[in-house]
Amino acid sequence: MNAMELQELYHLIGLQPEVIGQLECAAREIPWEQTAPYLERLLDRETAPAAYRELNALLSDGPGHFKLLFCYLECARRAYDRYQDRHIPDQIYTDTMRCFPRFLRECGQMYFDRGWWSWRQTSLSLFRIGALEYEFLPYENRPALALHIPSDAQLTPEAVDFSLAQAESFFHTCFPHYRSECYTCDSWLLSPRLRPLLNRNSNILAFQDRFCILRENREDQEFIEHLFRRPRDTAYADLPAATSLQRQVKTLLLLGGTVGCAFGALNPVAHPT
């Protein structure tokens, strides 16, 4: 490892200064001889999921999971060479790896809880392109790309159009052998339960209208974490109501309703070329 290279990465992605101090302490406690093979496996999407589980067990991390975060950031640093090999623009690398400070902000900046997810970024399985993220994720045994909506995404129609158009060019150029047949999305933002709560000019509604909804899951509670930034088991009466959508969804929940999530496929007419 090269400390200066890691410091450059921290600066590039805007990692919080208070977290960097925690990482420096965590790095001194990592058993590097045992850890090294897992880092290589976290760079390959075939081996990364199992590598995360095994590494997480090996590290016996503290409550902040900073040893695991340090390992992921080291993998992110190493992944840069693989981006270069595929001629992936530096902006996409930076935007993709900015997931790490974003995850920390979502958790209050001093806790890393996305180890189960972050191997997607380090293994070149998922890329941030403009407003949206795109993951290699087959659908019904066909090559497909799953759209993910980061918490800081701008969902204006213009931003989504730009992201989709850039993604089409990106995957054609950098992964020409992966011929995606469709784009899918599994999100609380696609839930039909939201439609009565949204005005006709809503960016969320415009995003929903791009998709053919294939199934719903009314039991899913992930929307509580995303919309309210609270654990799923938070009492509904204790949920914040700072935004219009928070207030409306909170009222819906208190009246016995729910949001859940939905899975859909992008309509071809909604996909700019």
Image (cartoon, rainbow, N blue to C red):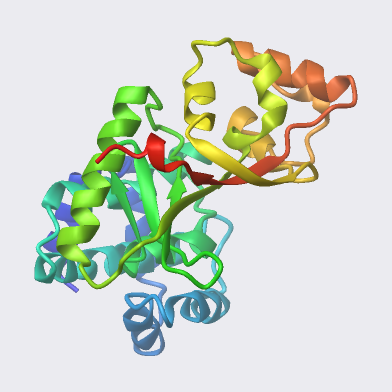
The location of residue 197, given as percent across then percent down, is 67, 15
Nearer to me, 247 or 197: 197
Vertical placement of residue 259 versus 35, above or below: above
Residue plotted at (37% across, 82% down): 41
Total labels: the figure holds: 0
Q: Is residue 74 left or right of residue 104?
A: left
Residue plotted at (57% across, 46% down): 264
Q: Quadrant of residue 83?
A: bottom left
Res. 70 visible in picture? no
Nearer to me, 263 or 110: 263
Image quarter where the N terminus lies is bottom left
Residue plotted at (33% across, 41% down): 16
Vertical placement of residue 125 versus 265, above or below: below
The location of residue 125, given as percent across then percent down, is 36, 65
Q: Is residue 199 left or right of residue 79?
A: right
Q: Hey, which residue is sitting farthest front in the picture?
A: 269
Residue plotted at (41% across, 89% down): 34
Res. 158 visible in picture? yes
Q: Quadrant of residue 226?
A: top right
